[in-house]
Image (spheres, rainbow, N blue to C red):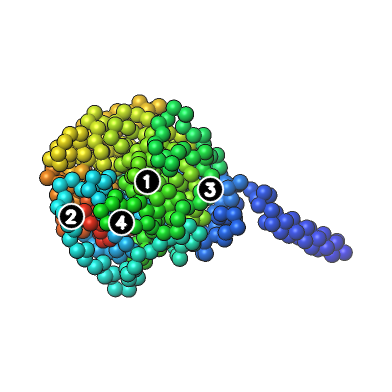
């Protein structure tokens, strides 16, 4: 009899527990911290097909926006140096003056830029370039078994959903191979870190709580362009236009809002939501929370510098307005350092973004201000600025060989130190820190205004520059570079010697 009563009590309690759990799952507010739920995108729009579940923003852990770990995984380290170029699937359309960064899922994001050559005197004009443009060769074919390169220009309507979603973060070893210059460091998107390897995250987190920061003070400079107006907060932004404008012959090239994503595993590009404010000469960086920042650049028919910052959340394929730059920046370069902050350099201004506070501060620029240097983050926490256009007239005076390293401090109290010069002075070169901890400066224009194929490799351990592999893949200026989740350094688009935009993409590997 007693066993029978116990059985009936257990059956009754099991029913009550099941009913309570069902009610909790139906009410996200009852879920504890760390529970997962399907992310919501823009109101009334479905989440991207196949998107993994991520933490509900109302119950997300406070560590979501922490620069100490965030959601981004580590990527493999190698002994290096990288020694060979591979051709991967070309961009769907030629583009120059674009930005690139690597997401937490290891995929590469190509953002904005311009698809046609600018007219004489435009911001995108190449110093010393010859008149006329060489014929653009066809996109290289894809390796066997991979997706072919698209044959037509792709436009990305603001309401479209990407045709594919990440298949997961790449698996990375927790230790570096012996003999590497920075064996205690591992690659993460847009920067390097010596933080321990973290487990595979959801491919893209929702907006972290508390990141709708206040805007810069009202004494911040403003640009003449309407797009330079500081956004009120990180609210939803409706992308303007449904495609990429084309420039009339002889006119300054119009900026585009095109955003495309390259999956190294599939060797294929897909479209993402357009950049709300089409821009050229912009910069991009990935935050530790996995969101992607499109920073400054030039917008509008007049190519006006802008202070606009827009933030992309991969999980919802959507853009929001970010905290505006302290001043308009027409040719910014950005890198995320090991402290989780984003450093943006443009001429005589260094702006530093703190994701936790959603605010910018400013610090001193290098002793000799330059435009369009290669800006990268070093494993030891410093930020390297190499080359660029120095002040002065004539193309021969523009390409700089100066290299400076910035050591961050508190409250903008960091300092710049000059390190070994570039062997070949270049401006508008692409640069990225490889999985071996070395910095790779690719192409650019030399002192004569000619596009060079030089690959200049910096080792921070001994403050030395060496030559890297050269070839057709490295001969370009105005390109973008980033290290992918597979550990290869990718160089995207740019311009040929005659200033014609390129669609080719090269990958530098070990």
Please tell me which residue lies in front, 24 or 50.
Answer: 50
Of mark 4 and mark 2, the one earlier in the sequence is 4
Estimate how packed mark 2 is, as few (under 14), some (14 to 19) or many (20 or more) residues with alpha carbons within 10 Å: some
**Residue 305 seen by the camera:** yes
**Dot 4: what SS?**
loop
Taking 57 as reference, is 462 left or right? left
**Residue 186 seen by the camera:** no
Q: Dot 1 corresponds to which residue?
A: 299
Separation of residues labelled 3 and 4 (CA atoms): 32 Å
Separation of residues labelled 1 and 2 (CA atoms): 23 Å
Q: Dot 4 corresponds to which residue?
A: 248
Q: Dot 2 corresponds to which residue?
A: 498
Q: Dot 3 corresponds to which residue?
A: 236
**Dot 1: what SS?**
strand
Asked where in the image residue 220 lies, by quadrant, the reply is: top left
Of mark 4 and mark 1, the one earlier in the sequence is 4
**Quarter the N terminus occupies:** bottom right
Separation of residues labelled 4 and 1 (CA atoms): 16 Å
Estimate how packed mark 3 is, as few (under 14), some (14 to 19) or many (20 or more) residues with alpha carbons within 10 Å: some
Of mark 3 and mark 2, the one earlier in the sequence is 3
């Amino acid at each position: 009899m007693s066993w029978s009563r116990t059985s009936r009590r257990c059956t009754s309690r099991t029913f009550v527990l099941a009913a309570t759990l069902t009610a909790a799952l139906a009410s996200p507010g009852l879920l504890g911290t760390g529970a997962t739920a399907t992310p919501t995108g823009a109101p009334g729009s479905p989440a991207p097909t196949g998107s993994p579940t991520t933490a509900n923003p109302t119950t997300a852990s406070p560590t979501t926006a922490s620069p100490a770990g965030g959601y981004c995984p580590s990527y493999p380290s190698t002994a290096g140096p990288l020694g060979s170029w591979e051709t991967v699937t070309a961009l769907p359309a030629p583009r120059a003056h674009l930005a690139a960064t690597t997401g937490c899922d290891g995929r590469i994001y190509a953002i904005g830029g311009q698809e046609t050559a600018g007219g004489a005197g435009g911001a995108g004009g190449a110093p010393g370039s010859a008149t006329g443009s060489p014929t653009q060769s066809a996109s290289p074919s894809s390796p066997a078994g991979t997706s072919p390169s698209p044959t037509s220009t792709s436009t990305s309507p603001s309401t479209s959903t990407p045709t594919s979603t990440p298949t997961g973060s790449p698996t990375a070893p927790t230790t570096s191979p012996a003999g590497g210059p920075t064996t205690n460091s591992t690659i993460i998107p847009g920067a390097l870190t010596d933080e321990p390897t973290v487990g595979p995250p959801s491919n893209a987190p929702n907006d972290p709580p508390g990141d709708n920061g206040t805007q810069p003070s009202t004494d911040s400079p403003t640009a003449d362009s309407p797009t330079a107006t500081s956004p009120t907060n990180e609210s939803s932004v409706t992308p303007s236009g449904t495609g990429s404008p084309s420039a009339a012959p002889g006119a300054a090239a119009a900026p585009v809002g095109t955003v495309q994503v390259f999956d190294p595993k599939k060797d294929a590009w897909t479209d993402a939501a357009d950049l709300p404010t089409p821009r050229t000469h912009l910069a991009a960086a990935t935050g530790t929370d996995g969101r992607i920042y499109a920073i400054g650049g030039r917008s509008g028919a007049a190519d006006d510098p802008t202070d606009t910052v827009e933030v992309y959340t991969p999980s919802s394929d959507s853009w929001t307005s970010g905290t505006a730059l302290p001043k308009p920046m027409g040719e910014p370069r950005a890198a995320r350092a090991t402290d989780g902050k984003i450093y943006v350099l443009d001429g005589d201004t260094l702006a530093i973004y703190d994701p936790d506070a959603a605010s910018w501060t400013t610090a001193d620029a290098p002793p000799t201000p330059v435009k369009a240097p290669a800006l990268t983050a070093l494993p030891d926490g410093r930020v390297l600025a190499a080359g660029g256009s120095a002040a002065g007239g004539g193309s021969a005076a523009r390409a700089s060989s100066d290299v400076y390293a910035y050591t961050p401090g508190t409250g903008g109290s960091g300092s710049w130190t000059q390190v070994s010069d570039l062997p070949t002075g270049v401006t508008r070169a692409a640069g990225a820190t490889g999985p071996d901890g070395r910095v790779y400066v690719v192409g650019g224009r030399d002192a004569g205004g000619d596009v060079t194929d030089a690959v200049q490799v910096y080792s921070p351990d001994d403050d030395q520059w060496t030559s890297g592999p050269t070839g057709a893949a490295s001969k370009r200026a105005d390109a973008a570079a980033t290290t992918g989740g597979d550990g290869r350094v990718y160089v995207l688009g740019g311009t040929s010697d005659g200033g014609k935009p390129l669609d080719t993409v090269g990958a530098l590997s070990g």
